[in-house]
Image (spheres, grey):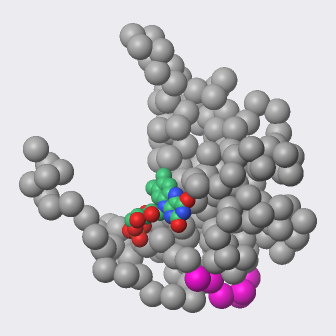
Amino acid sequence: MNFKELCQARYSCRHYQSRPIEAEKLAYIRECVRLAPSAVNRQPWRFILADADTPELLTRVKETYHRDWINEAPAIVLCMKAESECWTRRYDNKPHADIDLAIAIEHLCLAATEQGLATCWVCNFDINQFRDIVTVPDGLEPVALIPIGYADDEAAPKVRKDMKEVWL
Ligand SMILES: Cc1cc2nc3c(=O)[nH]c(=O)nc-3n(C[C@H](O)[C@H](O)[C@H](O)COP(=O)(O)O)c2cc1C
């Protein structure tokens, strides 16, 4: 699979098999995430895998995203930023933790796709409920949940803006 094929193959999967993910595949994905670039190489991110080994955590995390399909996910990666660690541009005080974390998360999604797994970005979880029922380490802010596992559906055709709208 070349990079364009990988970009086409990655899609937002909303139906998962219960089949667990092989440890080697998770290790490969973890390393791809670790290698992501970040502003001034600050790496202001932390990740926690919630899966069958942490059933209570997995259940609680699922409760914060109010869609039935999330219950099918055999695992969810909690993606958190450490804003105090990130680079901030002095000209406008713009912190770059969200940008950095987004790059690392997309590494996760693309690496998973390459390994035959499926993912979906989930940002529309209830952040207040999350803070109430999931213990987040000090200094971290949850940004996205990434369900990960073997797909039980197929990719829909990609809907994207025309090239001319995007490349000015
Ligand atoms: C930052 C971000 C947040 C998203 N949050 C959600 C979400 O909360 N729930 C959901 O079902 N999909 C979510 N998505 C998935 C998008 O809807 C999806 O990427 C987009 O429709 C394009 O489809 P594709 O990923 O299948 O190519 C999110 C995607 C991104 C990049």
Horizontal side of residue 156 vs 115, given as left or right:
left
| Above or below 116: residue 167 | above
Numbered marks: total: 0
Horizontal side of residue 51 vs 82, given as left or right:
right
| Above or below 122: residue 140 | above
Q: Residue at x 51, y 19 (%)?
A: 88
Horizontal side of residue 128 vs 103, given as left or right:
right
Please identify the quadrant where the C terminus is shown.
top left
Q: Is residue 126 found inside the magenta-colored segment of the image?
A: no
The front one of 129 and 74 is 129
Inspect this view and state whether residue 138 appears.
Answer: yes
Horizontal side of residue 161 vs 57, given as left or right:
left
Q: Residue at x 68, y 65 (%)?
A: 66
On the image, which quarter does residue 156 sit in? bottom left
**Which segment did they paint magenta?**
15-20
Q: Position of residue 123 (x, y in %)?
A: 57, 53
Q: Residue at x 70, y 46 (%)?
A: 127
Q: Main secondary structure of the magenta part?
A: loop
The front one of 4 and 14 is 14
Q: Is residue 17 found inside the magenta-colored segment of the image?
A: yes
The front one of 80 and 3 is 80
| Above or below 100: residue 148 | below
On the image, which quarter does residue 43 sit in? top right
Q: Position of residue 89 (x, y in %)?
A: 44, 17
